[in-house]
Image (cartoon, rainbow, N blue to C red):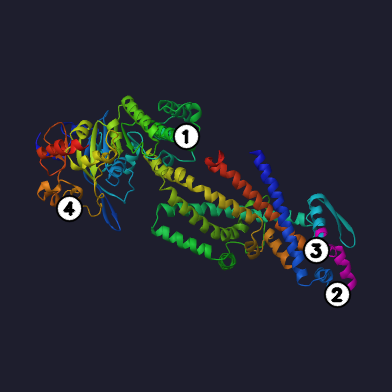
């Protein structure tokens, strides 16, 4: 594979057949303060049966990306360009009505806070029934039976009784289970989970992650997990995309990202994870500085003002934006960094890894 | 649920007693503070040429010589048990809930109220249907097209609507739509619905529109504010993510969430209105409860005023109770608490 084709399709050979294929996505919001470039040239792909984790700080464009895939940005507020191919169909060029028909049926989403994401005035059952009947022409009775079955499948006890309860009568974890039941009610091919465990009790988080993994096996859907929590992606993801300032910084399998990360930002994220097996004073290595403004993103590499290794690029990082390209090890590992791959691997091995 | 309703009804009865005592006190105490004696009070209710003897008899007949608690007690007794009224020439039996006899017309208040209530009810029901439909529709459209020409126009309309008093809009309506272009009747007529629904509506259309202009403006603003809030809620995003059609998203999820305050305000407005739409009834010469109240007040006719006040208070209390019960229907989160 030539380098140029790698640039266009950073994941490698399987790209053309990827079930969800996002290419050079740009989502810009015109505001009174200027153009907010929330997503600026992002590419990734997910196949059925695979899970992609998108990781990044707040404001890195993770949620904006997922909302673009779902077609949930209000028309006229966002300028979206690039391609979002779902099973070959470009969602950006499709009519709003066509995208609506696909929402819920071909692609579904679960949100961060299940309490506010469910309508407080309708029973959980009604909301699942509604979701099912949008795309399936069945009687209310059948849809209700389906809702009970879905609640049972996501592990809600006494689903026959619980189906008539209101969201506020559920516990936090149960609500997220119900959200998952609703999202999966039409058997979607793509499931996007936007921070699915962030609002939940720590003890419940693992259960929800287990549930998502089990259901993915059962439904064989493509899953995109959006999170700032590396623990979540470590648990679930096959592949990981690290985002920063609306761009992909590093992309690879979960093993590559956790065992051989090559981007200084990824090193920073790994250093920010609390570890119990270290002394308290050494446990956290925060990334200095703050995330950049998306209106006036730094020229060159957006991470360079916070990068400890910026000097190694000979000033290139300040002027030229690095592309997300293959790191040379093959196996689809892509990094957007001006440092030479050999140098990056050496710094990881000698300086970073011993500190983590 | 039933113990709750019983508790509320008991509280409502207590409130009505307080309202009647308060109203009674105003009529009893204020003139006496101003130096009135039973005789000077009674002169209002006799002919201009009456002798001192007639005045004294009238004062006695109307009970002005009795102390406050006895006067109130007599009135309250007739409400609960009915009683006997001295009309001068003869005594009249009046069964409960008799609200006394007018000092001036010597007509029983209760039946008169019953006579006039349909006029006010017709006015309130028709107007409220118009204002809820127009107000909520304008509010929803405004919220969905926030900042558009429609939104700005609607909000100017809303500001104008709440700013213009009924005695002005009513007179303007009459001037143009009853006299200049006689589309509507110039008020004063009322045909019961059961007799002829078309004429009933025709006579009331102008008062309805006058009244609903004021209220629909308020409801448009209220709905707009509520919709702007709910359309940004996460659950509306969820509804869209399910693939629901936009109009269903707006009405089933957005508007449903914005409905609670509208129901509350509607209950209060409606309750106040069926106790008498004073200005509208006066402007359009409709013989409803509001006009009855004005007649009573301008003529110092205590039984009339007491009767209307009590009835109006009763409606407000009942509508409040209905609103509180509806709350549980509208918002399931209230039900379990």
Q: The disc numbered 1 marks a residue on which chain?
A: A
The outermost residue toward the bottom is B49
Q: Badges 1 and 4: C-beta atoms under 8 Å apart? A: no
> For the residues marked 4 and 3, what is the alpha-carbon distance in whole angstroms?
90 Å
- Tell me where residue B111 sits by quadrant: bottom right
**Residue drawn where x is 51% and y is 28% of the image:** A161
> In this rendering, is residue B201 above or below A179?
below
Percent x, y of residue A151: 43, 28
Q: Is residue A23 visible?
A: no
Numbered label attached to residue B49: 2
Percent x, y of residue A237: 27, 32
As drawn, is B246 to the left or to the right of A308? right
Quadrant showing the N terminus of chain A: top left
Q: Mark 1, residues whose alpha carbon is within 10 Å: few (<14), some, or many (≥20)?
A: some
Would residue A254 be counted in the magenta stretch?
no
> In this rendering, is residue A14 above or below B250?
above
Numbered label attached to residue B103: 3
Q: Mark 2, residues whose alpha carbon is within 10 Å: few (<14), some, or many (≥20)?
A: few
Q: Which residues are magenta?
A: B49-70
Where is mark 1, residue-wise? A170
């Amino acid at each position: 594979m030539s380098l140029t084709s790698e640039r266009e399709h950073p994941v490698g050979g399987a790209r053309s057949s990827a079930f969800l294929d996002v290419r050079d996505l740009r989502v810009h919001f015109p505001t009174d303060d200027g153009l907010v470039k929330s997503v600026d040239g992002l590419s990734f792909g997910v196949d059925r049966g695979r899970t992609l984790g998108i990781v990044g700080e707040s404001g890195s464009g993770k949620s904006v990306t997922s909302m673009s895939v779902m077609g949930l940005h209000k028309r006229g507020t966002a300028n979206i360009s690039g391609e979002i191919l779902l099973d070959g169909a470009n969602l950006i060029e499709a009519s709003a009505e066509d995208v609506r028909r696909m929402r819920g049926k071909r692609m579904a989403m679960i949100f961060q806070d299940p309490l506010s994401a469910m309508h407080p005035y309708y029973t959980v059952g009604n909301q699942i029934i509604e979701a099912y009947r949008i795309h399936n022409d069945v009687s209310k009775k059948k849809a209700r039976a389906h809702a009970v079955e879905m609640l049972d499948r996501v592990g809600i006890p006494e689903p026959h009784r619980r189906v008539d309860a209101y969201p506020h009568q559920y516990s936090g974890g149960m609500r997220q289970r119900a959200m998952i039941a609703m999202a999966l009610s039409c058997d979607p091919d793509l499931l996007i989970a936007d921070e699915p465990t962030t609002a939940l009790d720590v003890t419940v988080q693992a259960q929800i992650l287990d549930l998502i993994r089990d259901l993915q096996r059962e439904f064989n859907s493509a899953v995109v997990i959006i999170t700032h929590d590396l623990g979540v992606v470590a648990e679930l993801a096959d592949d990981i995309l690290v985002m920063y300032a609306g761009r992909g910084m590093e992309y690879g399998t979960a093993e590559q990202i956790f065992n051989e990360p090559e981007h200084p930002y990824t090193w920073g994220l790994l250093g920010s994870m609390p570890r119990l097996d270290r002394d308290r004073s050494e446990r956290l290595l925060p990334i200095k500085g703050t995330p950049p403004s998306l209106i006036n993103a730094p020229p060159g590499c957006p991470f360079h003002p916070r990068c400890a290794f910026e000097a190694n690029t000979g000033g290139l990082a300040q002027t030229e934006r690095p592309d997300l390209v293959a790191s040379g090890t093959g196996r689809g590992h892509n990094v957007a960094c001006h440092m030479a791959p050999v140098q990056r691997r050496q710094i990881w091995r000698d300086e970073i890894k011993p500190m983590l | 649920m039933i113990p709750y309703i019983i508790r509320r009804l008991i509280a409502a009865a207590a409130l009505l007693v307080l309202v009647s005592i308060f109203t009674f006190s105003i009529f009893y105490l204020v003139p006496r503070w101003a130096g009135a004696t039973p005789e000077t009070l009674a002169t209002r209710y006799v002919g201009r040429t009456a002798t001192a003897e007639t005045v004294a008899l009238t004062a006695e007949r109307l009970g002005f010589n009795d102390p406050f608690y006895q006067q109130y007690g007599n009135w309250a007794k007739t409400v609960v048990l009915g009683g006997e009224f001295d009309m001068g020439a003869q005594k009249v039996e009046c069964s409960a809930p008799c609200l006394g006899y007018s000092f001036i017309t010597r007509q029983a208040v209760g039946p008169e109220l019953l006579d006039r209530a349909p006029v006010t009810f017709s006015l309130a029901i028709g107007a409220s249907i118009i204002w809820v439909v127009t107000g909520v529709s304008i509010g929803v459209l405004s919220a969905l097209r926030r900042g558009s020409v429609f939104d700005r126009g609607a909000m100017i309309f809303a500001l104008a609507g709440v700013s213009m008093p009924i005695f002005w809009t009513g007179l303007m309506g009459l001037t143009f739509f009853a006299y200049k272009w006689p589309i509507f009747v110039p008020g004063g007529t009322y045909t019961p619905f059961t007799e002829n629904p078309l004429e009933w509506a025709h006579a009331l259309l102008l008062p309805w529109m006058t009244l609903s202009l004021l209220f629909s403006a308020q409801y448009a603003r209220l709905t707009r504010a509520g919709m702007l809030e709910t359309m940004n809620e996460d659950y509306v995003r969820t509804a869209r993510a399910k693939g629901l059609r936009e109009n269903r998203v707006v009405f089933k999820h957005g508007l449903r969430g914005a409905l609670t305050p509208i129901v509350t305000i509607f209950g209060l407005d409606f309750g106040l209105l069926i106790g008498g739409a004073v200005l509208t009834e006066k402007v359009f010469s409709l013989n409803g409860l509001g006009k009855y109240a004005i007649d009573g007040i301008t003529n110092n006719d205590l039984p009339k005023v007491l009767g209307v006040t009590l009835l109006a208070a009763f409606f407000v209390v009942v509508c409040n109770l209905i609103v509180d019960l509806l709350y549980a229907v509208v918002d399931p989160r209230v039900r379990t608490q």
